[in-house]
Image (cartoon, rainbow, N blue to C red):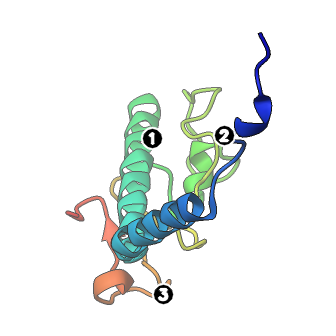
Amino acid sequence: MRVDRSNHRTQAGFTLIEIMVVVFILGLLVTMVAPRIVGRTDEARRVKAAADVKGIEEALHLYKLDSGFYPTTDQGLEALVTLPETGNIPHRWNQDGYLEAVPLDPWGNQYAFLSDGDTYDVRSYGADGVEGGEGKYADIDGRTQL
């Protein structure tokens, strides 16, 4: 028994129509989803800054639990990473530090830190890096509700 294989075509790959349908569907998805994602970049940065401020505040509280006071403005947030060498030096300080590194805010600026040793204020000045402002330019501190 002989089988004639000339009439049997094997299908390898996709047809042009199949590829065009897939490209059309992907394009449709992008046009529906992209506007929702693109407009949320500023909001995501503000959420990240608020989370960073909360983390820094937690580290400041741990520092105060060990030493009895907060680092001063002159010592800066660097006192949460390395043992301060000036000002009021804590006798009990966590050798691992309280933060791995002092973070920058999502816009690449340093977090503002003011402290007299008894109280503190930590904040990001937002997208413009200048105190005050509204919307994406508004300051973000530990009390910011997003």
Question: Who is closer to the viewer here, 84 or 144?
Answer: 144
Left or right: 121 with respect to 12?
A: left
Question: Who is closer to the viewer here, 2 or 131?
Answer: 2
For mark 2, what is the residue?
A: 83
Q: Amino acid at mark 1?
A: Ala
Q: Secondary structure at mark 2?
A: loop
Query: Picture coordinates of residue 116 (x, y %)?
Result: 42, 61
- Asked whether residue 53 is in view, the answer is yes
Q: Are marks 1 and 2 in contact (CB under 8 Å)?
A: no
Query: Picture coordinates of residue 52 (x, y %)?
Result: 44, 53
For residue 128, above or below residue 105? below
* Image mark for residue 59: 1
Which residue is at 32% across, 65% downward? Answer: 141
Q: Nearer the viewer, mark 1 or mark 3?
A: 3
Q: Secondary structure at mark 3?
A: loop
For mark 3, what is the residue?
A: 128
Q: Amino acid at mark 3?
A: Asp
Q: Residues within 10 Å of mark 1 (few under 14, many from 20)?
A: some
